[in-house]
Image (cartoon, rainbow, N blue to C red):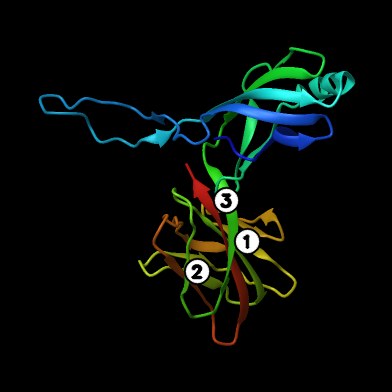
């Protein structure tokens, strides 16, 4: 069964739009895990291979179907519109939560008229980042108290934390395992600090800033269990922080 609504780069692949009814008859590579990649090195004079890192390849998607156009003119308008984009967001809605990924065209788009109002089409896409994303969850952080972060995907997710307030001596974000991310520079009124826990990049008002962090540990939020996080600062400081976590799938 295909999804009720499939879109890519603002184009309808399954559903109705101004051209007519698009029906997806095949969707490959979206529900599956990407193939793994990594080096293989045999153990000399021993069983098996060395246990080396393994990663996911880019996600390859093939999607095709039919267009039942409202008229012959609409069919040709749809062809011109459909074959244009090179990249855009691919989204599937209708089977559980909406999932999306950013995808680029991986081959030429096929659009073949069969009758005056019926066409068959196919597009092959590549997601350089093979992860898929879903619902965005926000968690207000309270100074000095742990707050449980979680997501409902099936792959490691990362939090993005935004901080405002007044903390001349900086602040620290911690998790119970002993790792922490320390901002040594001041948080001034009117500023918004942002920390991306996937990359460790620190920004002030959207600009990447160097030299204002100390220990900069980063950590993932695994699917299933909660991952507590807290923010600490001097007792006289005021910090308002929000962690954002997106359901992450592979």
Q: Identify the residue at horizontal 40%, vertical 58% (top origin).
A: 224
Q: Residues within 10 Å of mark 2 (few under 14, many from 20)?
A: many
Under circle 1, the secondary element is strand
Left/right of residue 222 with respect to residue 207 in the rendered view: left
Q: Residues within 10 Å of mark 1 (few under 14, many from 20)?
A: many
Query: Can you see residue 9?
Result: no
Q: Identify the residue at horizontal 52%, vertical 41% (top origin).
A: 131
Compared to 111, does 160 lie above or below?
below
Query: Can you see residue 202?
Result: yes
Residue 189, image x, y percentages? 72, 75
Q: Quadrant of residue 186?
A: bottom right
Q: Residues within 10 Å of mark 3 (few under 14, many from 20)?
A: some
Q: Which residue is mark 2?
A: 173
Residue 53, image x, y percentages? 34, 37
Q: Which residue is mark 1?
A: 194
Q: Quadrant of the N terminus?
A: top right
Under circle 3, the secondary element is loop
Disc 2 to disc 3, C-alpha distance: 30 Å
Q: Which residue is mark 3?
A: 97
């Amino acid at each position: 069964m295909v999804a009720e609504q499939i879109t890519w780069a603002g184009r309808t692949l399954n559903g109705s739009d101004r051209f007519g009814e698009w029906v997806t008859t095949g969707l490959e590579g979206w529900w599956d895990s990407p193939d793994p990649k990594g080096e293989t090195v045999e153990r000399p004079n021993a069983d098996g291979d060395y246990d080396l890192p393994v990663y996911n390849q880019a996600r390859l998607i093939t999607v095709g179907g039919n267009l039942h156009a409202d008229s012959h003119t609409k069919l040709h308008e749809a062809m011109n519109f459909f074959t244009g984009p090179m990249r855009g967001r691919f989204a599937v809605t209708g089977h559980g939560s909406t999932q999306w990924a950013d995808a680029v065209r991986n081959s030429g788009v096929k659009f073949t008229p069969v009758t005056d109002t019926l066409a068959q089409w196919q597009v092959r896409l590549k997601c350089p980042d093979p992860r898929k994303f879903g619902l965005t969850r926000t968690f207000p952080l309270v100074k000095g108290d742990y707050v449980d972060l979680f997501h409902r995907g099936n792959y490691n997710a990362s939090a993005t934390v935004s901080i405002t307030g007044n903390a001349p001596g900086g602040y620290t974000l911690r998790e119970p395992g002993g790792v922490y991310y320390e901002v040594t520079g001041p948080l001034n009124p009117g500023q918004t600090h942002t920390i991306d826990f996937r990359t460790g990049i620190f920004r002030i008002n959207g600009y990447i800033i160097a030299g204002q962090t100390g220990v900069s540990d980063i950590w993932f939020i695994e699917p299933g269990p909660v991952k507590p996080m807290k923010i600490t600062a001097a007792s006289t400081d005021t910090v308002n922080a929000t962690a954002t976590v997106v359901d992450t799938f592979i």
